Image (cartoon, helix red, strand yellow):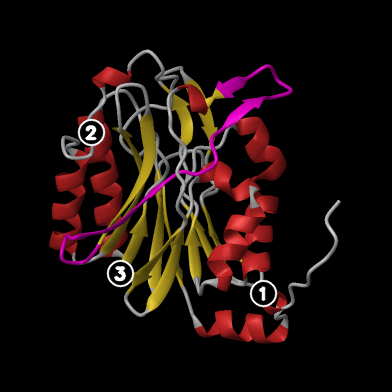
Amino acid sequence: MRVAAIQMTSLGSIEENLRAAETLIRRAAEQGAVFIATPEVTDQVIANRAEKIAEHFTQDQHPGVPFFSDLAKELKVTLLIGSMCVRVDEAKLANRAFLFGTDGALLDTYDKIHLYDVDLPNGESHRESNSFEGGKQAVLSDVGSHKLGLTICYDMRFPHLFRTLGKAGAEVIAVPSAFTVPTGQAHWHTLLRARAIEAGCFIIAPAQVGDHDGVRVTYGHSLIIDPWGVILGEALEDLPQVIIADLDFSLVGKVRQAIPCLQHDRDFIDL
């Protein structure tokens, strides 16, 4: 399966971001990708939204839903929009991924489970829980004859989620992200390679990159990784782009047979 990870720089206008994503998605489809994934918050600039929740669209209102549905149908690709921000009640948003099939049907959604509430050594503080309601459901979807696990960004720091998806049959796990620069420099490659190795599956991690209207700067380095932890593709430039890789799913079985750690759980006395 030829897959693509889209790296982009979401800015202030939803319409502008939809068109920017479309350009890159079309470029990926022209290169033969049949599964294409975009980053976290494809639809808007990354910022504190706690005081602007009422301005956001519900899923039924969001222009990105029909826009990307039509695009997936036109290009005949399976399209994962890494996430868009949708209002779920008067006080909270969901950081929600959308998976569209080749006929444009909405196959699945996934709400980011783990929320990014951190105080970084460089002085940056983030409180995603001020604006967002965390998801409660792991999601495993069908992409053709293969199984896709859905996660978003900060989820990658919680290996039990990836192990759960791997044990449920995930052959590839998507990790659309908007990583900060300091944490990206320190942890991005290490965490994603570890999650691929632990789960014995491919990882596709499309990322935001660059300066988002002066509100935030993101790390980029979108990655595609195989089940052995080998990087198959990486966005090495700090600008919007497409990376492509051909996934040989027989490698999943070979790795899991060689090191069947997903079958080796043992009960132990907890601390």
Residue 262: assigned label: 1
Name the element at disc 3: loop
Quarter of image, res 85: top left
Q: Amino acid at mark 1?
A: Leu
Residue indicated by mark 2? 58
State left or right for residue 239 relative to residue 17. Answer: right
Within 10 Å of disc 2 (Cα), the crowding (few <14, some 14-19, many 20+) is: some
Within 10 Å of disc 3 (Cα), the crowding (few <14, some 14-19, many 20+) is: some
- In this view, the residue in front, 260 or 234, is 260
Image point (37%, 13%), residue name:
51
- Res. 31 visible in picture: yes
Residue 32: assigned label: 3
Q: Earlier in the sequence, mark 3 or mark 2?
A: 3
Name the element at disc 2: loop
Reply yes or no: does residue 108 show up in magenta: yes
Give the image location of residue 150, x and y in percent.
45, 57
- In this view, the residue in front, 136 or 75, is 136
Give the image location of residue 230, x and y in percent.
64, 67
State left or right for residue 166 relative to residue 45. Answer: right
Q: Which residues are magenta?
A: 101-126
Quarter of image, res 139: bottom left
Q: Earlier in the sequence, mark 1 or mark 3?
A: 3
1 and 3 marks in contact (CB < 8 Å): no
Q: Earlier in the sequence, mark 2 or mark 1?
A: 2
Q: CA distance from mark 1 to mark 3?
A: 33 Å
State left or right for residue 216 relative to residue 121. Answer: left
